Amino acid sequence: MLKGSYRVGASRVAGRRGPLHRGIVRGLVGDESGAVAIEFAAVSTLFLMILFGIIAFGFQFATRIALDYAVSEGGRAAVAGLTNTERETLAKEAINRVLDAYSGLVDVDRTTGITVAPNGTTANGDQKLLISIKPTARFTYLPFVPDMSNLPAVSTTFIVADPSS
């Protein structure tokens, strides 16, 4: 045997109860290096669910704001009309222009719930005009934005005053 060489016996390396086996078992029992990865997986899953929930709510909220702005612009345009049919035409054109501007967020082809209708009169005799948009189907292009068809319509009332009286 050469000086400094070490003879590896079958019981020391390959044996079930050899010192190498006992060292591996002892090392695995006290090893906690994978605990951080498991904790990260649990925490990051919850964090990502909350993050994407906030993003989906933000897109739904932005869509509602776009609808509210479209209704307001439709009402402003409708006030310029002289007859009810002209007011309705002006309002729908203005609403569609606004929704075209938000085309990345709102699908204009699905705007079937636009209503422009007289809604009584004021004490002065001025006509009230109710303008509303009711999302009747999935209203956005984005697949992760929830369906808004069960929400109430976005509506506003404008007063059409005759300046000659």
Image (spheres, rainbow, N blue to C red):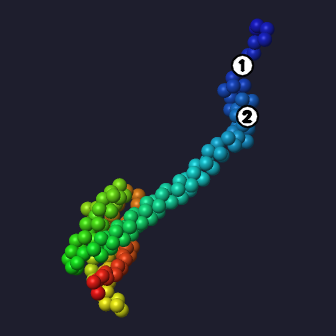
Q: Label for residue 55?
A: none
Which residue has dot 2 on it?
Answer: 22
Which residue has dot 1 on it?
Answer: 8
Q: Helix, strand, or loop for circle 1?
A: loop
The foreground one among 93 and 99 is: 93
Q: Earlier in the sequence, mark 1 or mark 2?
A: 1
- State the residue at coordinates (27%, 80%): 117
Q: Quadrant of residue 136?
A: bottom left
Looking at the figure, which quarter contains the C terminus? bottom left
Badge 2, how many Cα within 10 Å: few under 14, some, many 20+?
few
Task: Name above or below for residue 9 compared with residue 62.
Answer: above
Task: Name above or below for residue 101 compared with residue 33.
Answer: below
- State the residue at coordinates (36%, 79%): 157
Task: Name above or below for residue 141 compared with residue 130.
Answer: above
The foreground one among 153 and 31 is: 153
Residue furthest right in the image = 3
Residue furthest top in the image = 2
The foreground one among 145 and 126 is: 126
